[in-house]
Amino acid sequence: MEAKNTTDVRITDLERTVIDSIRDFNKIGGFEELINSLEGVHYLDEKKLKRYLDIYNTQGLY
């Protein structure tokens, strides 16, 4: 299968999506929606999470 019409489409992995959601939870519907979304996450790669936390370098995310 070949991807079509993917010009300028950015895709992130689950770990990046979780960090971004926590960082900007008001943009995804607020704190309650964040909690509801995180309940569906059963596994995260710790190394990837650490890498994204280091990139953002925001104390509030730790």
Image (cartoon, rainbow, N blue to C red):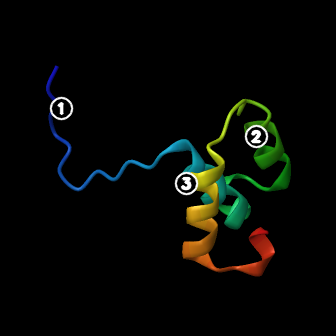
Please give left or right for residue 56 compared with residue 1 in the image: right
Residue highlighted by disc 1: 3
Amino acid under disc 3: Arg
Determine which quarter of the picture holds residue 20: bottom right
Report the quarter where the C terminus lies.
bottom right
Q: Secondary structure at mark 2?
A: helix
Q: Position of residue 31 (x, y in %)?
A: 83, 54
| Amino acid on which disc 1 is placed | Ala
Residue 2 at x, y percent in the picture: 14, 26
The disc label shown at residue 16, or none: 3
Report x, y in % for residue 24.
67, 65
Q: Earlier in the sequence, mark 1 or mark 2?
A: 1
- Look at the numbered disc 1 and give the secondary structure of its residue: loop
Q: Mark 2 highlights which residue? A: 38
**Foreground pick, 60 / 49:** 49
Task: Give above or below for 52 relative to 7.
Answer: below
Upstream in sequence: badge 3 or badge 2: 3
Q: Quadrant of residue 37?
A: top right
At label 3, counting other C-alpha atoms closer than 10 Å, the crowd grade (few under 14, some 14-19, many 20 or more) is some
Q: Is residue 22 above or below residue 14?
A: below
Q: Is residue 54 left or right of residue 5?
A: right
Name the kind of residue labelled 2 in the image: Leu
Where on the picture, by quarter, is residue 19? bottom right
